């Protein structure tokens, strides 16, 4: 599974986007350490604020099937430049992925921006922050 293949899988996932309100389809493909790929698309709702982004769909699918170790994620949309994850997705990605993990931000025209989880959300609030807080009884 190389970068190009992962990006192709994000495009396939994008086709399943449920976007009757925004009409803006997004796809994601999340590669696990054992070589499995979880696809995600954005899923909207008539109660607009309940939309779930493609990235979080992919992560929640993986975690719900017992996978929590990830190697890379690709995101795609029909954007002018590479599609950039929202703040909520950056936080959720940071919960499970190391700051060094590669992130491929892409679009349908074939632009690819390779970045990392740490670059997307520097100084992320992490699970360890809770246990290190010194406020336990
Ligand atoms: O990185 C992103 C940015 C936006 N969206 C979705 C949320 C909503 O359904 C639509 C418009 O914001 O795009 C994603 O899935 N991922
Ligand atoms: Zn998002």
Image: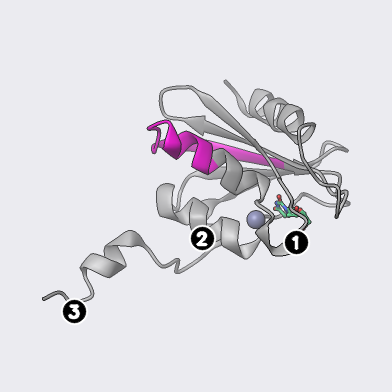
Q: For mark 1, what is the residue? A: 48
Residue plotted at (75% across, 61% down)? 48
Query: Residue visible at 64% across and 39% down?
Result: 74
Between 57 and 32, the residue placed more toward the observer is: 57
Can the viewer see residue 112 in this picture?
Answer: no
* Residue farthest along the front direction in this orientation: 46
User: In the picture shown, does residue 29 fall above or below 132?
Assistant: above
Give the crowd class for mark 1: few <14, some 14-19, many >=20 residues within 10 Å: few
**Label 3 residue SS:** loop
Location of residue 129 (image quadrant): bottom left
In the figure, 8 relative to 61: above or below? Answer: above
Quarter assignment of residue 110: top right
Task: Give residue 77's mark.
Answer: none
Q: CA distance from mark 3 to mark 2?
A: 23 Å
Q: Is residue 132 left or right of residue 24?
A: left
Cα distance, mark 1 to mark 3? 37 Å
Other-residue count near label 2 (Cα within 10 Å), few / some / many at <14 / 14–19 / ≥20: some
Q: Position of residue 45 (x, y in %)?
A: 74, 53
Q: Position of residue 52 (x, y in %)?
A: 65, 51
Mark 1 against mark 3, which lies toward the viewer? 1
- The local secondary structure at tag 1 comes to helix
Q: Is 108 on the left or on the right of 69, as rendered?
A: right
Callout 2: SS: helix
For the C terminus, the image quarter is bottom left
* N-term mark: 3 or 2: 2
Q: Are marks 1 and 3 in contact (CB under 8 Å)?
A: no
Q: Where does the image place residue 35, in percent across and percent down from the top left? A: 47, 22
**Magenta-drawn segment:** 59-75
């Amino acid at each position: 599974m190389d970068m190009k293949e992962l990006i192709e899988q994000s495009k396939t996932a994008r086709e399943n986007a449920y976007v009757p309100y925004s009409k803006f389809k997004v796809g994601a493909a999340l590669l696990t350490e054992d070589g499995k790929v979880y696809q995600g698309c954005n899923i909207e709702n008539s109660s607009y604020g309940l939309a779930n982004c493609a990235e979080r769909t992919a992560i929640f699918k993986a975690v719900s099937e017992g996978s929590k170790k990830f190697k890379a994620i690709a995101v795609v949309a029909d954007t002018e430049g590479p599609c950039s994850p929202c703040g909520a997705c950056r936080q959720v990605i940071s919960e499970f992925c190391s700051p060094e993990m590669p992130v491929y931000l892409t679009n349908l025209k074939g632009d690819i921006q390779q970045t990392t989880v740490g670059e997307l959300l520097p100084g992320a609030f992490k699970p360890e922050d809770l246990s290190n807080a010194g406020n336990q009884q």
